[in-house]
């Protein structure tokens, strides 16, 4: 590294932590870490700091947790007063206004989990799996006011293997974000505008995105189960209970969509069938299918409904 930069890091979830550690380990002067405020979690609903907050405290870095920044002029002034060379943003969770984007001398760099311009937005990892993409990656971009529209500094592809889940792809992408942003800070590459063609959007996930529709084809439903793991998780109705599906695989078979075809259990889909391999009842532990069925039988011929 040619010189230590004065920077702020802005991030919240597990995805962001490797980049924070990489910047700290490289000797950059991290004068502030911005994260989402602590939120109630667990059975006791105790106020719990997010992963980046915990990592920053472990590293001895100052933490700021403003609940909002977009229209807070006092926060804008405080950010300017940091006298930053650059800010590095990775899944922060708050929209930065122009006053903050323009404050650092080299602007704000975002570690975005897709190969822009494909999958702009909040859920790019899940969207790539859901769409059946064979690759995605990390883009280091210079932020502007549009949604992930800024010019690109670096891009690196990561393959999406046929059985890959969101946690697996998340970890693969998080692992390269840190080295890539260090390279961007060191080399200061010329920004390249994003192409106008190939733009797609990945909206923020909602619980309803996990609702299983047996009329989908089995391959699409398999992708949904892998994409929505761990949140919001995929689920369906079986009698009075909502059953969560943690793992499944598409197989040959057919019948009225939602029909239990065998004791695996294999369920008929709009095209093909899907074998459920790991299931969970509400308030219970997730279990392999054979063990699950000993406590919750699903007789052959039963027609399952989507969850309401």
Image (cartoon, rainbow, N blue to C red):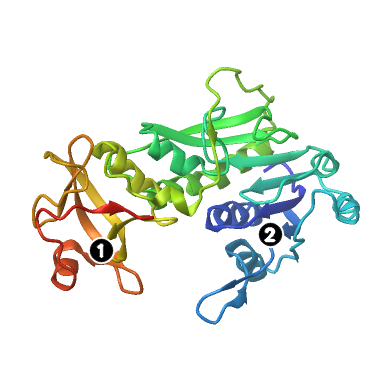
Rendered image quadrant of residue 145 = top right
Foreground residue among 109 and 164: 164
44 left or right of 64? left
Which quadrant is home to the C terminus?
Answer: bottom left
- Is 46 rendered above or below residue 89? below
Rendered image quadrant of residue 201 = top right
| Residue 111 x/y as whole percent | 60, 42
| Residue 63 x/y as whole percent | 73, 65
Q: Residue at x 53, y 53 (%)?
A: 15
> In this figure, which residue is indicated by the disc labeled 1?
239
Marks 2 and 1, Cα distance to the nearest angstrom?
A: 42 Å
* Label 1 residue SS: loop
* Label 2 residue SS: loop
231 left or right of 106? left
94 left or right of 300? right
Which quadrant is home to the N terminus?
Answer: top right
Foreground residue among 189 and 235: 235
Q: Which mark is residue 35?
A: 2
């Amino acid at each position: 590294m040619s010189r230590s930069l004065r920077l702020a890091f802005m991030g919240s979830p597990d995805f962001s932590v490797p980049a924070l550690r990489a910047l700290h380990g490289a000797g950059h002067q991290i004068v502030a870490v911005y994260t989402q405020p602590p939120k109630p979690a667990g059975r006791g609903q105790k106020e719990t700091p997010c992963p980046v907050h915990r990592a920053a405290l472990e590293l001895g870095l100052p933490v700021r947790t403003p609940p909002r920044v977009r229209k807070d002029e006092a926060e804008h002034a405080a950010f300017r007063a940091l006298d930053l060379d650059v800010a590095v943003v990775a899944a922060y969770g708050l929209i930065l206004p122009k006053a903050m984007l323009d404050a650092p001398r080299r602007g704000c760099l975002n570690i975005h989990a897709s190969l822009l311009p494909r999958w702009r937005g909040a859920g790019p990892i899940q969207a790539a799996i859901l769409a059946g993409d064979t690759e995605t990656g990390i883009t280091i971009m210079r932020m502007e006011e549009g949604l992930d529209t800024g010019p690109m500094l670096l891009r690196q592809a990561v393959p999406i293997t046929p059985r890959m889940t969101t946690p697996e792809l998340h970890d693969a992408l998080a692992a390269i974000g840190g080295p890539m942003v260090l390279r961007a800070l060191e080399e200061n590459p010329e920004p390249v505008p994003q192409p106008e063609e190939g733009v797609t959007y990945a909206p923020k996930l909602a619980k309803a995105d996990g609702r299983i529709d047996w009329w989908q084809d089995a391959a699409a439903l398999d992708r949904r189960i892998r994409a929505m793991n761990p949140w919001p998780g995929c689920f369906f109705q079986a009698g009075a209970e909502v059953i969560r599906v943690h793992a499944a695989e598409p197989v040959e078979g057919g019948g009225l969509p939602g029909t239990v075809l065998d004791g695996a259990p294999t369920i008929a889909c709009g095209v093909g069938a899907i074998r459920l391999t790991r299931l969970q009842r509400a308030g219970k532990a997730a279990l392999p299918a054979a063990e699950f069925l000993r406590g919750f039988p699903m007789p052959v011929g039963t027609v399952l409904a989507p969850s309401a």
